Amino acid sequence: GAIKASGLLFYSSLIVGTFVASLCSWERLSEAYHLSSGY
């Protein structure tokens, strides 16, 4: 019970963290791309 719940919590936070990090890096990448391409 408790171990399973904490495992689920850990994995869900890991997934959310990865998703947020990829969103942030994607915004930075597109920003750098726009700056370098002149848009």
Image (cartoon, rainbow, N blue to C red):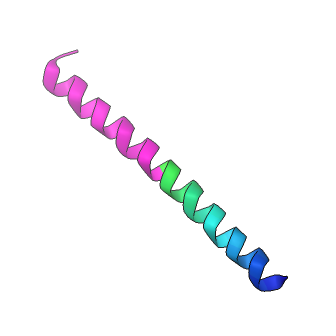
Give the vertical position of 12 relative to 27 (above or below).
below
Residue situated furthest top in the rendering: 39
Q: Where does the image place residue 14, in percent across and percent down from the top left?
A: 56, 64
In the figure, 2 relative to 9: above or below? below
Q: Position of residue 1 (x, y in %)?
A: 85, 82
Residue 5 in the figure: left or right of residue 20: right
Of 39 and 26, which appears nearest the observer? 26
Main secondary-structure element of the magenta-colored stretch: helix
Does residue 22 belong to the magenta stretch? Answer: yes
Residue bounds of the magenta highlight: 21-39
22 left or right, relative to 37: right
Q: Which corner quadrant holds the C terminus?
A: top left
Marks counted in the figure total: 0
Q: Is residue 37 magenta?
A: yes
Q: Above or below — where is 32 with respect to 7?
A: above
User: At 73% across and 78% down in the image, what residue appears?
Assistant: 6
Picture residue at 58% right of the left edge, 55% below the top: 16
Q: What residue is drawn where x is 51% and y is 50%?
A: 19
Q: List x then y, in percent, for residue 38.
A: 16, 17
**Residue located 23% across and 33% down the image:** 32
